[in-house]
Image (cartoon, rainbow, N blue to C red):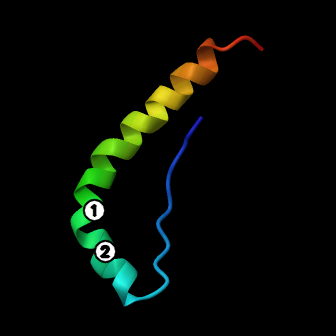
Amino acid sequence: MTISTTVKFHNWLGILYFLPVRPFHKLIVPSMLKRIIGRLESSPA
């Protein structure tokens, strides 16, 4: 299974906002996705 995120910018303000957020996004999102996968795998069917 592959899970990914997509960031869509609606205007240049979104790009400016995401510039300082991007490094944290790259750190936080993968760990959040791994945690979600772990919960899904351990939950009863």
In this picture, residue 44 sits left or right of residue 12: right
Q: How many marks?
A: 2
Helix, strand, or loop for circle 1? helix
Q: Which residue is mark 1?
A: 21
Q: Which quadrant would the N terminus be assigned to in this image?
A: top right
Query: Which residue is nearer to you in this view: 20 or 2?
Result: 20
Give the x, y percent position of residue 6: 50, 62
Residue furthest right as drawn:
45
Q: Vertical placement of 13 versus 26: above or below?
A: below
CA neighbours of label 1 inside 10 A, class few (<14), some (14 to 19), many (20+):
few
CA neighbours of label 2 inside 10 A, class few (<14), some (14 to 19), many (20+):
few
Q: Amino acid at mark 1?
A: Val
Give the x, y percent position of residue 29: 39, 45
Q: Amino acid at mark 2?
A: Tyr
Query: Which residue is nearer to you in this view: 16 or 6?
Result: 16
Give the residue drawn at x 52%, y 21%.
38
The answer to whether the residue labelled 1 contacts the one labelled 2, judged by CB atoms less than 8 Å apart, is yes
Q: Classify residue 2 by image quadrant.
A: top right
In this picture, residue 29 sits left or right of residue 23: right
Query: Which residue is nearer to you in this view: 18 or 4?
Result: 18
